[in-house]
Amino acid sequence: MTLAAEEISSAVDDPAVAEVYGSLHLAAAWVTTTLGRLDVADTHVAEAAETAARSGPVTNFANLWFGRGNVQIWRVDLAVERGAGGKAVEIARATDPATLPRAASRRSAWWTGISRGLASDRRTWDEAVQVFRTAEEIAPQRFRTNPLVREVVDDMRRRSRRDSVGRELRGLAYRMGIAV
């Protein structure tokens, strides 16, 4: 990904190239985060954010939806992946929803990331379930098959005592095909 970004960096003034270039940096941030190379991930996110800031309005080349709002969606997801659910929620609250991509899949991803952040703290599970429902309503096909969401919902379900698992959480698990 990094080599591909380098290869096209000289043409980044073209809006379509800028979207690919920024998206490659976001993907590289995800990979380096999962490898525990957080400093490298931060560098990739910073480059993507800088590219989004100078590239102007989203042209949505190749359905990438690259822009300021999409960078924020990735920041939320990356914070959750780092185990910083509270930071993910903080990033989300500081983001103007008007900057988010119009695509239902990206808006659902936004709410999914926030939910995963909220689910990291048992005290905010009720809120997490409500926000999961919002994500599901926006793009049920994406939400219900998302392996990261399935893992969180199943974990919440298993960690709750059977009697205390809320109706909404059981409903989410059921619709996702998770045994309740």
Image (cartoon, rainbow, N blue to C red):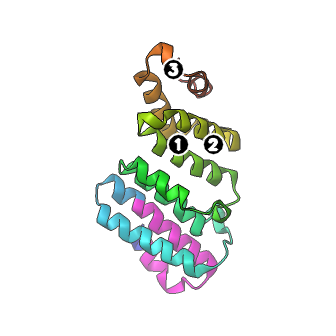
Horizontal placement of 97 versus 158: left or right?
A: right
Q: Quadrant of residue 38?
A: bottom left
Q: CA distance from mark 2 to mark 1?
A: 9 Å
Tell me which label, 3 or 2, sits earlier in the chain.
2
Residue 129 seen from this side: yes
* In magenta stretch: residue 25: yes
Tell me which label, 3 or 1, sits earlier in the chain.
1
Nearest the eye: 113 or 14: 113
Q: Which residue bears the numbered disc 3?
A: 165
Q: CA distance from mark 3 to mark 1?
A: 17 Å
Q: Report the residue at 53% width, 64% height from top.
A: 71
Q: Amino acid at mark 1?
A: Ser
Position in image of residue 165 (x %, y %): 51, 20
* Pointer 2 with pointer 1, Cβ within 8 A: yes
Circle 3: element type:
loop
Q: How many marks?
A: 3
Horizontal placement of 102 versus 5: left or right?
A: right
Q: Which residue bears the numbered disc 1?
A: 115
Magenta-colored segment: predominant secondary structure: helix
Position in image of residue 15 (x %, y %): 63, 79
Q: Is residue 57 positioned above or below 142 on the image?
A: below
Q: Which residue bears the numbered disc 2?
A: 135
Crowd around label 1: few <14 · some 14–19 · many ≥20 (10 Å): many
Tell me which label, 2 or 1, sits earlier in the chain.
1
Horizontal placement of 40 versus 4: left or right?
A: left
Start and end of the magenta stretch?
Answer: 4-29
Q: Report the residue at 46% width, 61% height from top.
A: 27
Query: Which quarter of the rendered picture does the N terminus lie within?
Result: bottom left
Q: CA distance from mark 3 to mark 2?
A: 20 Å
